Image: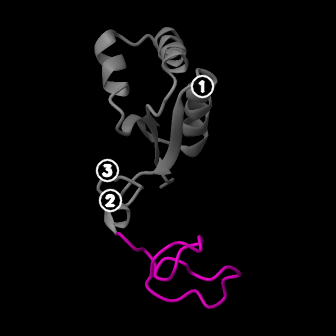
Amino acid sequence: MADLYEVVYIDKFEDITEATVARESLKSRFGLNDHMLSTLSSGVPVVVKKNVDLEEARRFEQAIKDSGGVCWVQEMAPDGRFHERRLEQRRKQQDRRHQVRGSAIVPDRRSGKGRRTLDPH
C-alpha cells in the first residue's frame, strides 16, 4: 500500500492587506464559503486535504501557494488523525540545551556575563 499524505494550511499573515488578498484568492479558486474561510483564518493548522498520494498532495500544495496561502505536506499518522508536527513540549522549555557547547565558535553566554561591560554578573 502506498503512503498517504495530508495537506495542512495555516494562516500566518502579519500584514492585513496580504491576508485579505490571499483569502479572497483562496475563496475564488476553491469555492469556499464564509464559514470555511473563517475556519482557515483561525491561526491554527487545519488539514485541508487528506488520504491522498504525494503527487496529488504536492499539486494541492502548489495551488494553495499560488493563491498566496501558507501550507505544507506531511505524511499521515498511522491512526489517521492529525498530529501537530511542531512539538509543544519543546517550545515550553526555557533552556533547550542540555549540555555545554564545547565545539561552538562563540562561547555560550547565557549563564555568564552579558556582552556589555556594564552588565552585572
Q: Label 2 crowding class (10 Å Cα cut-off): few <14, some 14-19, many 20+?
A: few
Q: How far apart are labels 2 and 3 at the CA level?
A: 20 Å
Q: Which residue is mark 2?
A: 88
26 sits left or right of 62 in the view: left
Which segment is the magenta one?
A: 94-121
13 sits left or right of 48 in the view: right
> Which amino acid type is marked by label 3?
Gly
Q: Which residue is mark 3?
A: 80
Residue at image point 59% right, 70% down = 116
Residue at image point 54% right, 74% down = 114
Which quarter of the figure has residue 40?
A: top left
Q: How far apart are labels 1 and 3 at the CA level?
A: 24 Å
The answer to whether residue 81 is above or below residue 104 is: above
Nearer the observer, 14 or 67: 14
72 sits left or right of 77 in the view: right
Residue at image point 55% right, 19% down = 18
105 part of magenta stretch = yes
Q: Which residue is mark 1?
A: 63
